């Protein structure tokens, strides 16, 4: 039985463990107790991008059309659902914005051949997504259909899924939200995110655009998770950050979040990083080195030292205060 984390690693990573089973069964997230705070919701994934009048619509449309083409050319089991969520779906992207794609794997058994084909499709999608954003860190979010019957909103809030756009057929989503489980896991994730920021090492390599983008991304999730863990509100990311500011600004300074927001607005990726990444991929076509190409090319440009040092200090302070608050 494959757990979702093992399946995600197999589908996303450059070097993954091979799958030996003839047919694959997937193991849902285990529940230590039966939670009663359940809520059933149904909606369809959107077929079209939002905010069609935005300046960035043509770029978003090109990305979505390319991803749809990759999926449509594949030979996947019909029940696999692909979607794009976040700013690429709703609009108002910046040069910092990630391309956030999710995949929902059906409950049925799939063969080893089908799993390999799914990995191939996801790797093709990642190759394209990384070429659009050579500083992108994460892979594609893997969700098991069986987990939708006890859904953990700390993975992706339902309000975020409602604004997601389908990359294959528009699908009806039937979700039973486990609210108590969502809050418990949000707190666990919040502690991990805070620790990641607190333990971030202050050295020259960590001031590279690649490392700093990772830090900013982790930091910006902290107010979102704080809202989920503390007041049990699961909102779209931008709305969650605004709501968290309103609730906590008198207790926790949001200087680091303000700085991160400015970084995101002014984010600029030097053109040579795109070319360098492409060269790295072309030089070594034998080995699957997508993520290494990201790390290497993204580590050749840096944030100014004094600006990076101040931001890292404020980020650590913010994470420490949030952790103290949630532990009280």
Image (tube, grey):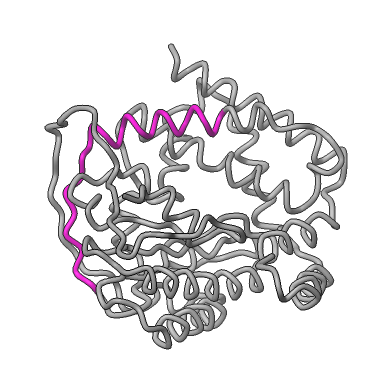
Q: Nearer the viewer, residue 176 or 88?
A: 176
Q: Nearer the viewer, residue 25 or 258?
A: 25
Question: What percent of the width, then of the height, locates residue 31?
Answer: 24, 34
Indicate left or right for 79 with 246 as reference: left
Q: Nearer the viewer, residue 58 or 148?
A: 148
> Is the residue 108 above or below the residue 187 in the image?
below
Question: What percent of the width, then of the height, locates residue 87?
Answer: 48, 63
Q: Residue furthest top?
A: 328
Queried whether the magenta region covers residue 176, the answer comes back as yes
Magenta highlight range = 171-194
Question: What percent of the width, then of the height, locates residue 166?
Answer: 34, 74
Residue 20: image quadrant is bottom left
Question: What percent of the width, then of the height, locates residue 7?
Answer: 42, 55
Secondary structure mostly seen in the magenta stretch: helix
Indicate left or right for 45 with 34 as reference: right
Residue at image position (61%, 32%) is 196
Residue at image position (25%, 58%) is 145
Q: Nearer the viewer, residue 269 or 3?
A: 3
> Is the residue 226 above or below the residue 116 in the image?
above
Residue at image position (31%, 49%) is 1
> Is the residue 72 above or below the residue 173 in the image?
below
Queried whether the magenta region covers residue 86, the answer comes back as no
Residue at image position (77%, 70%) is 277
Residue 133: image quadrant is bottom right
**Callout count:** 0
Q: Quadrant of the C terminus?
A: top left
């Amino acid at each position: 039985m494959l757990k979702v984390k093992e399946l995600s690693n197999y589908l996303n990573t450059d070097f993954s463990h091979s799958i030996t089973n003839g047919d694959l069964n997937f193991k849902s997230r285990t529940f230590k107790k039966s939670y009663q705070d359940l809520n059933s919701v149904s909606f369809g994934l959107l077929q079209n991008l939002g905010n069609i009048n935005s300046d960035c619509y043509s770029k978003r449309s090109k990305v979505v059309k390319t991803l749809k083409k990759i999926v449509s050319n594949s030979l996947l089991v019909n029940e696999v659902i692909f979607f794009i969520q976040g700013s690429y779906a709703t609009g108002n992207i910046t040069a910092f914005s990630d391309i956030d794609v999710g995949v929902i794997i059906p409950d049925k058994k799939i063969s080893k051949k089908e799993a390999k084909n799914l990995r191939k499709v996801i790797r093709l999608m990642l190759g394209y997504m990384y070429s659009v954003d050579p500083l992108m860190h994460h892979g594609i979010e893997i969700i098991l259909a069986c987990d939708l019957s006890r859904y953990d909103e700390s993975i992706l809030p339902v309000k975020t899924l409602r604004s997601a756009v389908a990359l294959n057929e528009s699908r009806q989503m039937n979700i039973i939200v486990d609210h108590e489980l969502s809050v418990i896991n949000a707190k666990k994730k919040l502690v991990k995110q805070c620790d990641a920021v607190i333990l971030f090492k202050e050295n020259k390599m960590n001031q590279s655009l690649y490392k700093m983008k990772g830090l900013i991304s982790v930091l910006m999730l902290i107010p979102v998770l704080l809202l989920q863990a503390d007041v049990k509100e699961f909102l779209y990311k931008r709305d969650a950050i605004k709501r968290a500011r309103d609730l906590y600004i008198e207790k926790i300074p949001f200087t680091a979040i303000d700085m991160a927001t400015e970084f995101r607005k002014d984010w600029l990726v030097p053109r040579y990083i795109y070319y360098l990444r492409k060269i790295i991929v072309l030089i070594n076509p034998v080995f699957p080195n997508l993520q290494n190409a990201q790390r290497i090319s993204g580590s050749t440009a840096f944030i100014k030292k004094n600006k990076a040092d101040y931001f890292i200090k404020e980020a650590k302070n913010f994470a420490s205060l949030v952790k103290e608050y949630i532990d009280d």
